[in-house]
Image (cartoon, rainbow, N blue to C red):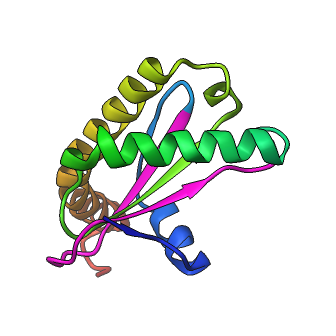
Amino acid sequence: MQRLRRRADFLAASGGVKAHGAAIIVAALDHRSDLPPRVGFTVSKKVGNAVERNRVRRRLREIVRLAAADRFRKGLDYVIIARRAALAQTYGSLVSDVARAFDRVNERGRHADHDKVATRRGKADRRGPGIR
C-alpha cells in the first residue's frame, strides 16, 4: 500500500465517491489504471489537540494496514477523513466503521461512470432537440 503525500492528490480524491460513517468519511477516486491503491489520512484540528489527532491517525493507519488492506482496489486513491467521534469509538467499532465505508465506496465506484453518462444524457435531452 502506498501513501498519498501531495495536497493535489488529496483534493482530487475528495472530489470522487464518498461514504460516511459514524467516525470517518472515506473518499475514493478511480484513475482507471493498474497502479497499486494509495491511501491518505486527514485529521483536522476539529478532532482535537495534537496528541488526540496523532492518536486517531495512528489507529486509522493500523486499521488500514491490518483489517482493510484486502478491501482496496487497484487504480483507486482513498482518503480517510477522521471526525471527532473517532476519539471516543472503541477499536473494534472503528474497524467495522472503516470496513463498511470501504465496501460502500468500492460499490459506488463501480457504478459512478454509468451515473455520469446518464446525467450528461439527461441534461442534453432537456435542452431540446436542436441544441447539442
Magenta-span inclusion, residue 25: yes
Magenta-span inclusion, residue 48: no
Residue 127 versus residue 18 in the image, above or below: below
Q: Which x, y percent locates residue 95?
A: 39, 28
**As rendered, which of 45 and 2 lies closer to the eye?**
2
Residue drawn 66% across and 25% down? 85
Residue 29 versus residue 88 in the image, above or below: below
Residue 50 versus residue 8 in the image, above or below: above
Q: Residue 7: name its quadrant.
A: bottom right
Q: Which x, y percent locates residue 82?
A: 60, 41
**As rendered, which of 22 and 37 lies closer to the eye?**
37
Q: Is residue 76 left or right of residue 93?
A: left
Q: Which x, y percent locates residue 132?
A: 29, 81
Q: Is residue 83 left or right of residue 66?
A: right
**As rendered, which of 25 and 51 lies closer to the eye?**
51
Q: Which x, y percent locates residue 92?
A: 42, 19
Q: Which residues are magenta?
A: 24-46
Residue drawn 45% across and 18% down? 93
Q: Residue 104: name its quadrant.
A: top left
Q: Residue furthest right?
A: 49
Residue drawn 63% across and 39% down? 56
Residue drawn 60% across and 47% down? 57
Position of the N terminus, as image quadrant, is: bottom left
How many numbered discs sit on the rendered protein?
Answer: 0
